[in-house]
Structure formats: C-alpha cells, structure tokens
Amino acid sequence: MRDAIIETLAYRPRGATVAEIAQGVSERIGPTPPSSIRSYLRLNTPKLFTKIDRGHYVVREEAQVTLPFTDRQNDYRLVVTPPREAFRFGNATLIHGDCFEWLANAQTNSIEAVVTDPPYGLVEYSEEEQAKLRAGRGGVWRIPPSFDGNKRSPLPRFTVLSRDDIGDLERFFFSWTRLLFPVVVPGAHVLIASNPLLSFVVANAVTRAGFERRGEIIRLTMTMRGGDRPKAAHTEFAEVSVMPRSMWEPWLIFRKPIEGRVQDNLRRWKTGGFRRPSKDQPFGDVIASAPTRKVERVLAPHPSLKPQAFLRKIVRAVLPLGEGTILDPFAGAGSTLAAAEALGYNSIGIEKDSRYFDVARLAIPKLRALKPS
Ligand SMILES: C[S@@+](CC[C@H](N)C(=O)[O-])C[C@H]1O[C@@H](n2cnc3c(N)ncnc32)[C@H](O)[C@@H]1O
C-alpha cells in the first residue's frame, strides 16, 4: 500500500485527492477502497505525507521508496524520489524526477522525438562521484591537461569501466529503451549522445529493445580525450599516443519502426524522416561544432553541457514537419529544452538531481535567448 501510494503521488507534484490516490493504488495493486487510503494517510501524516489545501496530499520530500520493477526481461530496482515540482517555460516542461519512473507511467504514442545525452559511467552522477566532482578531488571525473593555461572542464573517465560495468551499462540502456519504446510514436527518431568507446554497447541495447539503427551524426569537435603519451613514461615514448586524440562525438540515430511507407507514417504520426535545413539541402550527418561556449557554461553550470548551436540543428531536424513533442529524459541543465524553445517546439525534460533541476530552471530561459554563435 505504502509503495503504491507513493508511486501514485510521485508524478503529481501538486498532490492528489483521496479518490485519485485510491484509483492509482487500485490500478497498481488491485481494488482498494478510498476508506483504506484515508486511514493509511491519516496514520502516516505528517511522517510520509503532507496535507496541502483542498484535501490534496503530497509525499514529503524526504520520503524515498525503492520499487521492484520488471520490464518483462529484466528486473530493475527503481529508487523513486518524488519530484519536488515541475517547471514550465513557454512550451517546455521540466520535471524533477526519475525518467524510468516517468516513462513507466507515460502515455503510449505521446512523444515524437528524443534528443538526449545520458549518463555513461552509471556512477558518474551518483551522490558520491558528484561530491568528488564538486570538491575537485579524485573520482571518475578528471581535469584534462591544460596546454595553454586555460582552465578546462572536467570529463568523466570512461576507460575505468570494467567488463561488469559494461554489462550493467548495456542492461541500463536496454531497460531504459524498453520503457521508451511504447511512449514514442512509430517513426520517432531517438538521438543519443555517445562516445567512441561505448557506442557499440548502446547500439546493441537499443536495437535489442526494438528500435532500428539509422546511422549516426558525427559532431566534429575537439573533445580533449586521448592523444596523451604513456603515463609516467612520456619522455621515453615521446612519439607515442596511447589512444587517438578524439576530435568527434557520435550521436547515435535510432528510429521506432514505421507503419507502412514513410509517406504514410509522415501523414499519420508526423514522423519517420528528418527536417531539411532548407528545401534544397538534405539533412547531413557530419556537423562541425565548437566546444560549448563559456557564456553558456556560465549560464548553465553542468559538467556535460552541450552547445546550443549544435543542439538547435539536431533538435530542429528530428521533427520532420516541425510538429510534435521532443523528450529529453536526462535533461541536465536543460540545454535540449532551451534549443526546442528557441525553435518553437514543444518539449519535456526529466532531471533527477535537484541541483541540476534548479540550474536548468534558471538556465532554460537564458540559453533560449542566446543567439547561436
Ligand atoms: C550527461 S548529463 C546531461 C547534460 C545535458 N546534455 C546538458 O546539456 O545539460 C546526464 C544527466 O542525467 C541525469 N540523470 C541521471 N540518471 C537519471 C534518471 N534516471 N532520470 C533523470 N535524470 C537522470 C543526471 O543527473 C545528469 O544531469
């Protein structure tokens, strides 16, 4: 009962009445009369729940629950933190919550495209690693070497992932895209930021979940990864680079299978292709992109912030007719939502970390107002 009530309230930031909670609980654990809900709420208020105005209840922020969750093939344990709130700006909605939980409850065929930059290390956005990043000490985040005296942004170290971690990563992407599959419409494109070391893991998981692989966009940019000489032996092996200096970032392209021909799918679902930059120019898969500008990093301090100029190009392209809603389930500082807003598209973002949710709330209107470089 406790878990079912918390789950019902998890995505109702403005609270729900006893009748609404009873309905949600009945859907989850079978018929439950409002009288049982009322007594449970009475017993556990204010420990777990707060009564706000007009008989509405919300979950207290500190109440967290781990829900067992099976997506038919995998057991997945979700730690659900009730969202503190949702933020709306223009046609953008940012929800503070866990995207797995949000997707599990989202309406079927309600999203026309996804543009997202997910976490890769699985641990890099854990409380522990975020604390180390914020303190600037140790952990999986490292500061790339400075050649020119300029301060560099920290990058997560993907090379520390073990075989088991890679297995976990595959399961993470599989569970996530299994949940995503019914939520997007046929022909919806899903663009996922990746890196050359781990993109094969993502591609495997996402296609296993039912999506078609449709190539990748190469974001040409200096990433500051690789290129270094062997550690502690750089004078001995002065002419060696252990790995190539990476100058591109893959954005993997997937599509939910279309219904009928592309033209049929475009008419019915408004999806299935890409919007051209202009009538005479096809959408291409190599996009030159400078690293995220300082002005953006100051407005939206997030270690993985993507640049507006690049995002606006791909966000524009994923709605072939310029109609529909774009989802970013790992919204970070809200850069995808800001790009969608700049283009006049509808968008929804989910961000789990309350600090980044707060950053995004302030950053979206400001990023949206920037002129692309
Ligand atoms: C790589 S960052 C995205 C940064 C974003 N591209 C930007 O420009 O700001 C991934 C984000 O996903 C968030 N996150 C991780 N797991 C999540 C989950 N299950 N649900 C929602 N957000 C999650 C992290 O807190 C982090 O801010």
Image: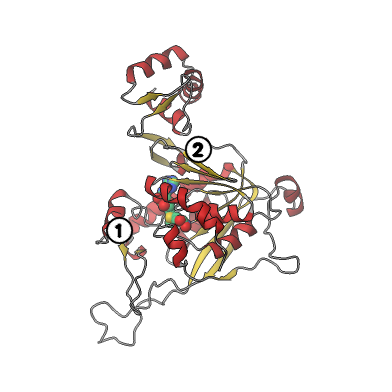
User: Hey, what amino acid is under mark 1?
Assistant: Leu
Mark 2, mark 1: which one is toward the viewer? Answer: 1
Regarding residue 373, the answer to whether it shows in the image is yes
Image quadrant where residue 197 sits: bottom left
Q: Is residue 212 above or below residue 60?
A: below
Task: Look at the numbered disc 1 and say if its residue's Cβ is closer than 8 Å to ligand 1.
Answer: no
Q: Nearer the viewer, residue 266 or 330?
A: 330
User: Would you call the spot at circle 2 few (<14 residues within 10 Å), some (14-19), or many (20 or more)?
Assistant: some
Report how far apart the C-alphas of labels 2 and 1 lie in the structure.
Answer: 31 Å
The x, y position of residue 13, in whole percent, is 46, 33
Residue 133's disc is 1
The x, y position of residue 194, in whole percent, is 47, 61
For image coordinates 73% across by 54% down, the residue present is: 262
Regarding residue 170, the answer to whether it shows in the image is no
The residue pinned by badge 2 equals 104
User: Hey, what amino acid is under mark 2?
Assistant: Ala
Q: Nearer the viewer, residue 203 or 290?
A: 290
Q: Is residue 32 above or below residue 305?
A: above
Q: Secondary structure at mark 1?
A: helix
In which quadrant will I find the N terminus? top left
- Colouring of the image: secondary structure
The x, y position of residue 23, in whole percent, is 51, 21
